Image (tube, rainbow, N blue to C red):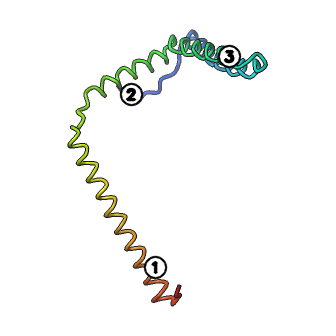
């Protein structure tokens, strides 16, 4: 699935489709701000229609098809994952919380010990 090669857009049609998608996104933003006096319903309708058209045009280009294929492959891989049972997930979570609590206590004790050593014994700064 992953390649080390850098892929570029080779065909003029794909470049035109990507340019059209970018132009539609710009048109969506411009339409949203320029149609402010027409009301929010018109603003959002123009914005959503232009964005939807940009998405359709993008997925018609080769990079869009590659992105869709990557998403399908990723979803297929997620389906292969063996998820832990509820009991196992709770146990692992409890172990993590316990470890975090022990480390927090250790770091607090280390901090207070060094504070006492440096500020009280060595420097003589009493609080």
Q: Earlier in the sequence, mark 2 or mark 1?
A: 2
Residue 3, position in %: x, y? 38, 27
- Locate residue 54 relative to residue 38 in the image: left or right: left
Badge 2, how many Cα within 10 Å: few under 14, some, many 20+?
Answer: few
In the image, 67 versus 41, the foreground residue is: 41
Instruction: Specify the label residue 3 is tagged with.
Output: 2
Q: Secondary structure at mark 2?
A: loop
Badge 1, how many Cα within 10 Å: few under 14, some, many 20+?
Answer: few
- Write down the residue under mark 1: 115
Q: Quadrant of residue 49?
A: top right
Q: Quadrant of residue 23?
A: top right
Residue 72, relative to residue 91: is it above or below?
Answer: above
Residue 47, relative to residue 119: is it above or below?
Answer: above
- Locate residue 15 relative to residue 40 in the image: left or right: left
In 3D space, how far apart are the residues under numbered discs 1 and 3 (Cα atoms)? 62 Å
Q: Earlier in the sequence, mark 2 or mark 3?
A: 2
Closer to us: mark 2 or mark 1?
1
**Residue occupying the point 47% across, 89% down:** 122
Badge 3, how many Cα within 10 Å: few under 14, some, many 20+?
Answer: few
Residue 9, position in %: x, y? 53, 18
Q: Secondary structure at mark 1?
A: helix
Residue 109, position in %: x, y? 37, 73
In 3D space, how far apart are the residues under numbered discs 2 and 3 (Cα atoms)? 45 Å
- Write down the residue under mark 3: 41
């Amino acid at each position: 699935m992953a390649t080390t090669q850098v892929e570029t857009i080779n065909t003029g049609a794909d470049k035109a489709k990507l340019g059209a998608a970018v132009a539609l996104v710009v048109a969506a933003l411009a339409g949203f701000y320029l149609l402010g006096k027409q009301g929010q319903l018109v603003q959002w309708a123009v914005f959503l229609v232009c964005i939807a058209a940009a998405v359709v045009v993008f997925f018609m280009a080769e990079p869009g098809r590659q992105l869709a294929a990557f998403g399908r492959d990723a979803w297929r891989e997620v389906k292969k994952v063996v998820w832990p049972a509820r009991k196992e997930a709770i146990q692992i979570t409890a172990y993590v919380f316990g470890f975090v609590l022990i480390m927090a206590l250790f770091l607090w004790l280390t901090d207070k010990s060094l504070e006492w050593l440096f500020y009280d014994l060595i420097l003589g700064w009493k609080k």
